């Protein structure tokens, strides 16, 4: 399905750019691992171009054009694009899912900030919940409960990333913590960005974010039983690895400005072993009622899109609007 040279290039991108995913993906069966590497490589290239480039608006618009070519069956001559195009064809990947990621990256390029947790979760749904839904598609799982829990895991991981990167983001002029939380702590966002310090108020906001992530990890774990048996250990491991990042932030007093939390290679291997044991335990445990919890409102559109059996070709109205804003900015009209 995917050319050997292209999948090797994707593997190299993930090995250097996403150590946590690379570690967890090793437990996936090859039929899922290779498409997942292609998916993550495409997402990684897209995220890096928007995050690290000087022309963020232009990077998003180029990504739009790349997706257009992929869904037309004429991918750009690059390993990640060719590999992802093969995945789209083989799995009938609904276009709404990668375009949700595109919309989230567009929000990044516009420098959007989030008033409350719901708005932040809407952003996390696009840049990470969409990936959870796409992973389900790669496992040939279109069950509504499993998709909702996969989106929970994506939300939890993204909230953990945001908590881990409070200092790094602030030094780059970015702010993701909900503004109403900052205001409740008496923190002026502009003053914080000028001089990011791990104040008690910032630590409390970081703790709130990680507590929300913990609840999502707890609920997401119930959906793993709906996945193919040989895929479960990898997904359990991914949750453990990212949750451990949040735990490390907590051990440092929720200060992610002075230090950046990470997990070591031995820790990752330990979590993988724990995940394998967890698969065995889950086989004899009754299903939790949490499995059937309603999807978070911010991810409901992803669950609906992923349950469809065909890859829709048109863009959403919301995506048209945000891309129009970017085009205006790129041309110097806004």
Image: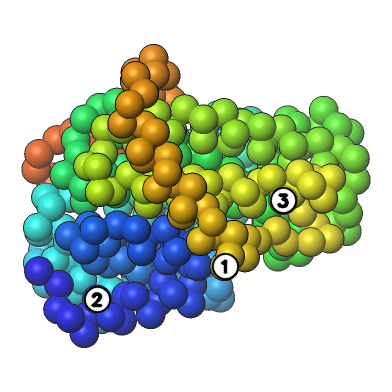
Q: Is 209 positioned to the left or the right of 299 in the image?
A: right
Picture layout, residue 332 above or below residue 145: below
Give the alpha-carbon distance from disc 3 to disc 1, as whole Å. Answer: 15 Å
**Residue 237: x %, y % from top left:** 45, 50
Task: Tell me if mark 2 has few (under 14), some (14-19) or many (20+) residues whose alpha carbon lies within 10 angstroms of its own.
Answer: many
Which residue shows up at 41% across the image and 71% down it?
14
User: Could you tell me if the residues under marks 3 and 1 are in contact, i.e. CB atoms within 8 Å?
Assistant: no
Task: Tell me if mark 1 has few (under 14), some (14-19) or many (20+) residues whose alpha carbon lies within 10 angstroms of its own.
Answer: few
**Residue 171: x %, y % from top left:** 76, 64
Mark 1 or mark 2, which is nearer the start of the sequence? Answer: 2
Badge number at residue 248? 3
Circle 2 sits on which residue? Answer: 7
User: Could you tell me if the residues under marks 2 and 1 are in contact, i.e. CB atoms within 8 Å?
Assistant: no
Q: Nearer the viewer, mark 2 or mark 3?
A: 3
| Disc 2 secondary structure class | helix
Picture layout, residue 190 above or below residue 326: above
| Disc 1 secondary structure class | helix
**Residue 152: x %, y % from top left:** 44, 34
Mark 1 or mark 3, which is nearer the start of the sequence? Answer: 3
Figure label count: 3
Give the alpha-carbon distance from disc 2 to disc 1, as whole Å. Answer: 23 Å
Does the image show residue 321? Answer: no
Which residue shows up at 86% across the image and 38% down it?
201
Which residue shows up at 9% across the image and 59% down it?
89
Quarter of the image that includes the N terminus = bottom left
Mark 3 or mark 2, which is nearer the start of the sequence? Answer: 2
């Amino acid at each position: 399905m995917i050319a050997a040279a292209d999948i090797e290039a994707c593997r190299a991108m993930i090995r250097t750019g996403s150590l946590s995913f690379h570690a967890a993906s090793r437990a996936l069966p090859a039929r899922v691992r290779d498409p997942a590497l292609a998916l993550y490589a495409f997402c990684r290239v897209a995220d890096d171009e928007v995050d690290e480039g000087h022309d963020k608006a232009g990077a998003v618009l180029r990504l739009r054009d790349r997706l257009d070519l992929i869904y037309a069956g004429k991918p750009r001559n690059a390993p990640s694009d060719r590999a992802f195009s093969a995945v789209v064809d083989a799995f009938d990947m609904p276009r709404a899912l990668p375009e949700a990621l595109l919309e989230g990256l567009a929000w990044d390029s516009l420098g959007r900030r989030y008033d409350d947790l719901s708005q932040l979760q809407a952003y996390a749904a696009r840049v990470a919940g969409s990936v959870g839904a796409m992973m389900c598609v790669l496992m040939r799982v279109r069950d509504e409960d499993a998709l909702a829990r996969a989106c929970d895991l994506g939300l939890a991981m993204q909230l953990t990333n945001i908590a881990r990167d409070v200092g790094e983001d602030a030094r780059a002029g970015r702010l993701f913590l909900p503004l109403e939380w900052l205001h409740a702590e008496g923190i002026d966002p502009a003053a914080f960005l000028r001089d990011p310090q791990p104040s008690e108020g910032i630590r409390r906001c970081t703790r709130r974010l990680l507590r929300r992530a913990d609840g999502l990890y707890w609920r997401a774990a119930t959906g793993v039983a709906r996945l193919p048996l040989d895929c479960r250990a990898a997904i359990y491991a991914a949750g453990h690895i990212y949750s451990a990042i949040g735990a490390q932030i907590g051990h440092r007093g929720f200060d992610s400005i002075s230090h950046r939390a990470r997990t070591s290679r031995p820790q990752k291997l330990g979590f993988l072993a724990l995940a394998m044991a967890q698969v065995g335990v889950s086989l004899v445990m009754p299903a939790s009622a949490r499995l059937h919890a309603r999807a978070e409102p911010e991810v409901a559109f992803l669950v609906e899109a992923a349950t469809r059996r065909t890859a829709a070709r048109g863009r959403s109205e919301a995506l048209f609007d945000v891309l129009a804003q970017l085009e205006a900015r790129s041309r110097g009209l806004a």
